[in-house]
């Protein structure tokens, strides 16, 4: 069971590491170009109420990274045609409204904020799974059941998970201010698990002290 969990932790660490590299590429591309241009950046930030050219309708496209919703960066531009007809013989009148898609614009400042937020979150989660793998390594074999290093790793892992939630919250607040959209996000799951792990680390710390005292008595 522990070996399977260790392999899973390594896989998730590599997966998040590659995702962090991808987020870094997006950030550097955005930094070099200075605006959301090109297929790469447009495919990332083309979220929210997106205009579908095939169906000629607006569809919702969502992209979320650990609770951080990237939205408001893309803004479609429309023009409106209003026409009214009136039949003077019958006295009937009709109204015609046509919505014309004129293109789109991107909020570069919000794109920078979201790319930095996603990069930080993915890097933190990569470190989290690396620490989880280290904790599982310490639990494998004939090593002491309670170790001070394990308690420290549990505490740091919990702190990182809480930090992920805080980064999500701060990024969404700044993004909302830049896009004038109310889109406040916080990942309650990582926040709660982080607090649990911080509390659990205290039990491991206490257990390591008891184990050390017991060894000294023998």
Image: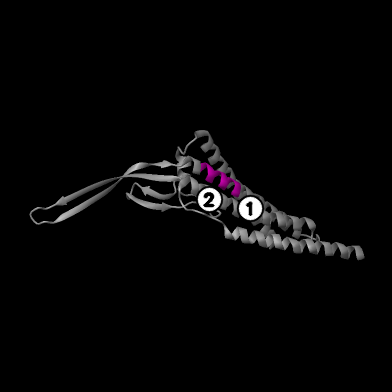
Residue 75 screen position, x and y as percent: 41, 45
Q: Earlier in the sequence, mark 2 or mark 1?
A: 1
Decide if residue 218 is in sight here: no
* Residue at 77%, 55% in the rendered image: 149
* Residue at 83%, 62% in the rendered image: 209
Decide if residue 167 is in sight here: yes
Looking at the rendering, in which quadrant would you find the N terminus?
Answer: bottom right
Looking at the rendering, in which quadrant would you find the C terminus?
Answer: bottom right
Q: Is residue 52 left or right of residue 116?
A: left
Q: Is residue 200 left or right of residue 123?
A: right
* Residue at 46%, 46% in the rendered image: 179
State the image quarter where residue 207 is shown: bottom right
**Which residue in the protein does label 1 denote?**
163
Task: Give whichever of 88, 59 is nearer the camera.
Answer: 88
**Which residue in the protein does label 2 denote?**
173
Task: Give whichever of 81, 157 is nearer the camera.
Answer: 81
**Is 145 located above or below residue 34 in the figure?**
below
Tell me which secondary structure the magenta stretch mostly adopts: helix
Q: Is residue 9 covered in magenta?
A: no
Q: Secondary structure at mark 1?
A: helix
Magenta segment boundaries in residue numbering: 111-121
């Amino acid at each position: 069971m522990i070996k399977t969990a260790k392999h899973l932790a390594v896989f998730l660490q590599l997966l998040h590491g590659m995702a962090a590299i991808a987020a870094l590429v997006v950030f550097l591309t955005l930094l070099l170009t200075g605006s959301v241009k090109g297929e790469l950046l447009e495919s990332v930030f083309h979220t929210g109420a997106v205009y579908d050219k095939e169906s000629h309708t607006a569809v919702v496209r969502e992209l979320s990274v650990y609770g951080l919703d990237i939205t408001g960066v893309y803004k479609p531009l429309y023009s409106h045609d209003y026409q009214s007809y009136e039949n003077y013989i019958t006295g009937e009148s009709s109204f015609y409204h046509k919505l014309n898609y004129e293109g789109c614009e991107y909020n570069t400042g919000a794109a920078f904020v979201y790319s930095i937020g996603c990069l930080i979150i993915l890097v933190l989660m990569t470190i989290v799974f690396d620490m989880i793998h280290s904790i599982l390594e310490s639990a494998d074999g004939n090593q002491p059941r309670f170790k001070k290093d394990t308690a420290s790793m549990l505490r740091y892992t919990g702190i990182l998970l809480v930090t992920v939630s805080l980064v999500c919250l701060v990024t969404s607040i700044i993004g909302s201010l830049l896009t004038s959209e109310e889109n406040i996000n916080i990942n309650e799951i990582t926040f709660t698990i982080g607090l649990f792990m911080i509390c659990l680390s205290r039990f491991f710390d206490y257990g390591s002290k008891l184990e050390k005292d017991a060894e000294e008595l023998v």
